[in-house]
Image (cartoon, grey):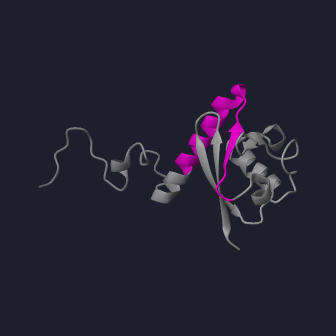
Amino acid sequence: MAALTVRVRLSTGVTLDLSLPADASVGALRAILAERTTILAEEQQIRCGFPPRPLGSAGVGGDASPLVAAIGGPNELLQLTVPPARARAVTRALEAAAASAAAAADGNAGDARAGPANPGLAGSPVRPAGAATAA
């Protein structure tokens, strides 16, 4: 079965591209967002469409509804409101997940120095400052 790609923009400015099964429900989306953002499913305020309308049990489609039917199509941008008190924690959780994924993709999960911030350190030998290189 084909995958459904959903773009979710958080009120903090971060955008998540999620790949879900085509038959995923609104509840499945909420579960994935809870895992990624640390915002519990029942605390999530998701809006879709124009003008934006609530998605899920409080608005369009219940949590058991097929996601694609509830949002109106596969290319819909969803908005997730992050409670101001949780903004910092959500940002840290997303940054940690991104760093973890980047380290795993680079094959440097055990080398904390290598990664997106220091790509030159990946796989290169460490030399003391001022050490001459062999010519």
* Total marks placed: 0
Please give the name of the residue rendered at 79% of the width and 58% of the height, measured from the top-left corner: 69
**Residue toward you, 82 or 122:** 82
92 in magenta: yes
- Looking at this rendering, what residue extends furthest in the left direction? 135
Q: Is residue 85 left or right of residue 63?
A: left
In the image, what residue occupies the spot 81% across and 58% down? 25
Q: Image height check: is 42 above or below 7?
A: above
User: Where is residue 10, by image quadrant?
Assistant: top right
Picture quarter with the N terminus:
bottom right
Q: Which region of the structure is painted magenta?
A: 74-100
Residue 11: x percent and y percent? 65, 34
Magenta-span inclusion, residue 81? yes
In depth, the one of 95 and 134 nearer the eye is: 95
Residue at 49% of width from left, 58% of height from top? 105
Q: Position of residue 81 (x, y in %)?
A: 71, 35
The vertical placement of 96 against 122, above or below, is above
Q: Main secondary structure of the magenta part?
A: helix
Q: Is residue 1 above or below residue 85?
A: below
Residue situated furthest bottom in the rendering: 1
Task: Give the farthest residue toward the top.
Answer: 85
The image quadrant where one finds the C terminus is bottom left
> Residue 70 location, x and y as percent?
79, 54
Asked whether 62 or 28 is in front, the reply is: 62
125 sits left or right of 73 in the view: left
